[in-house]
Image: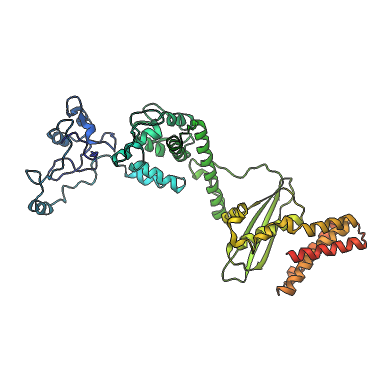
């Protein structure tokens, strides 16, 4: 044994105890650091084992074995030796002998503190997969802090660039660095000296996983850790100092948005859930107060069907009864094409209903990207996206409709608008060979009559207004 620094020999995992078969050390049951290194057991002043520390954490049998190991000069590196020969050099004979030894009664599966539960639980934390993976990297020591980079031969400064500490470890970066301490102090997770945060990364993660009292909101801790790490990277690579309060606010906001999305997804797939059973998850939803209209759009597509389905549901902030619509169309090329058709139809319906300040909602992320950046979706530029310029396509029929209203009475204007429905149905029967059932025809007739009775009060028409109304119907149906 030299200075105990051979590849950072670990106490609880590496077979360094010279028993009959080399094995890791055995704990006496006290609370110890799972990442404890062998070199931490050596008293640098006396250049010998720290006997008091050995007796505090190891089984008495191992204390005697460790104390018997000679310690070399502080400048001398450790060397590898073969336990089954006197010289410490490997021979084929000793290797063959070692393979024949009965190890059934001497192998011990668990010697010291086990961090496997921590690693396993990191994959069960309620957060995005990339953050769960980062939590696992923290517990396995795979985060590229300068301490780890130097171990892998990267020539870099081992000090912390944010606070000037002589060594940047994972625990220091996430819990002990001054900016990190400020963020944890500002968070809703209580910090207690000697309890959290501590000098052990495993104790800190154990505290966040299981020890935070339930009355405190702690489910945002994965995002806090994630954004502390991102703030560190911004300092390293961009020389940007992030304000701790802003980092915390961003982390909590991202946590609430993600948790809100998960709750809405569960409600959509399984119906309402009892939020009490979802521990430490804040409820969040769409803003309760809004102005204008909200139109929820969706499409249904199946490759084996001849038709696709489109539908919308519109609510109003003024307390008006909700409206809805559903229709069958010829099957589109793909589900995304159907989503586009559903949105276009919903837009036309909102225009026809004179609804203003309409916000459209969809569960299709590709549709949102398409609307935001239409030039990035050339496959839809010919088939569908030219119709997204509905403000221009509908200029003709909107213009004719306004002219009709200017020259005719409001009653005739309403009759012209209602006429669009039977004309559309007639064209579908003639050109698309669609057949409407008797119930559908009866429903359309009742709607037309009902709306006409409620809205048409006086009817006056002249030649110019009549021509404008006919042009409106013709333009609308050609565009459709």
Q: Is residue 252 left or right of residue 466?
A: left
- Is residue 251 left or right of 58 when viewed as pictured? right
The residue lying toward the viewer, choosing from 237 and 457, is 237
User: Residue sitting at 81 percent across and 57 percent down?
Assistant: 399
Point out residue 460 in the picture as x, y percentages from the top left corner: 93, 59
Frontmost residue, 129 versus 7: 7
The colour scheme used to paint the residues is rainbow
Q: Position of residue 475 (x, y in %)?
A: 78, 64
In the rendered image, the quadrant that contains the N terminus is top left
- The quarter holding residue 55 reads top left
Q: Residue furthest front?
A: 155
Q: Residue at x 55, y 42 (%)?
A: 283
* Res 446 visible: no
Please determine whether, in this image, residue 262 is positioned above or below residue 459.
Answer: above
Q: Quadrant of the C terminus?
A: bottom right
Can residue 115 be seen? yes
| Picture coordinates of residue 473, whole percent (x, y) | 81, 64
Is 430 on the left or on the right of 197, as rendered? right
Find residue 16 and report its horizontal and vertical position in percent.
Answer: 18, 41
Q: Seen from this angle, which residue lies furthest top?
A: 45
Q: Is residue 407 above or below residue 318?
A: below
Image check: 361 left or right of 417? left
Q: Quadrant of residue 382?
A: bottom right
Question: In the rendered view, would you say 47 is above or below 217?
Answer: above
Picture mark count: 0
- Residue at 44% across, 47% down: 130
Which is more toward the observer, 318 or 134? 134
């Amino acid at each position: 044994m030299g200075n105990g620094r051979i590849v950072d020999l670990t106490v609880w995992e590496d077979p360094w105890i010279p028993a009959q078969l080399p094995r890791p050390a055995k704990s006496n049951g006290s609370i110890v650091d799972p990442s404890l290194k062998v070199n931490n057991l050596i008293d640098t002043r006396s250049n010998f084992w720290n006997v008091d520390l050995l007796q505090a954490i190891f089984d008495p049998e191992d204390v005697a074995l460790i104390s018997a190991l000679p310690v070399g000069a502080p400048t001398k590196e450790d060397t590898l030796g073969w336990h089954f020969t006197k010289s410490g050099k490997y021979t084929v004979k000793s290797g063959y002998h070692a393979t024949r030894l009965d190890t059934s009664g001497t192998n011990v599966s668990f010697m010291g503190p086990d961090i496997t539960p921590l690693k396993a639980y990191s994959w069960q934390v309620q957060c995005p997969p990339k953050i769960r993976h980062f939590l696992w990297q923290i517990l396995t020591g795979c985060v590229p802090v300068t301490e780890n980079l130097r171990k892998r031969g990267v020539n870099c400064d081992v000090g912390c660039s944010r606070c000037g500490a002589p060594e940047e470890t994972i625990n220091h970066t996430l819990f002990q660095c001054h900016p990190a301490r400020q963020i944890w102090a500002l968070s809703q997770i209580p910090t207690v000296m000697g309890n959290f945060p501590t000098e052990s990364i495993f104790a800190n993660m154990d505290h966040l996983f299981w020890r935070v009292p339930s009355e405190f909101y702690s489910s945002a801790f994965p995002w806090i850790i994630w954004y502390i790490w991102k703030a560190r990277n911004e300092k390293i690579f961009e020389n940007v100092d992030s304000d701790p309060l802003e980092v915390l606010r961003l982390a909590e906001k991202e946590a609430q948005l993600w948790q809100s999305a998960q709750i809405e997804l569960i409600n959509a797939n399984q119906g309402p859930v009892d939020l009490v059973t979802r521990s430490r998850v804040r409820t969040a939803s769409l803003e309760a107060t809004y102005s204008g209209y909200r139109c929820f759009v969706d499409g249904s597509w199946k490759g084996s069907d001849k038709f696709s389905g489109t539908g919308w549901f519109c609510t109003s902030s003024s307390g008006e009864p909700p409206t809805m619509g559903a229709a069958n169309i010829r099957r589109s090329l793909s589900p995304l094409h159907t989503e586009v058709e559903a949105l276009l139809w919903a837009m036309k319906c909102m225009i026809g209903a004179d609804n203003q300040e309409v916000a459209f909602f969809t569960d299709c992320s590709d549709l949102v990207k398409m609307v935001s950046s239409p030039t990035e979706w050339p496959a839809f530029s010919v088939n569908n996206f030219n119709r997204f310029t509905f403000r221009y396509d509908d200029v003709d029929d909107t213009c004719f409709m306004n002219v009709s209203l200017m020259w005719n009475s409001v009653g005739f204007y309403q009759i012209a608008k209602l006429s669009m429905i039977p004309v559309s149905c007639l064209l579908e029967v003639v050109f698309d060979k669609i057949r409407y059932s008797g119930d559908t025809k009866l429903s359309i007739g009742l709607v037309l009559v009902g709306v006409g009775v409620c809205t048409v009060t006086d009817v006056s028409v002249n030649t110019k207004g009549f021509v404008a109304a006919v042009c409106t119907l013709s333009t609308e149906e050609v565009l459709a």
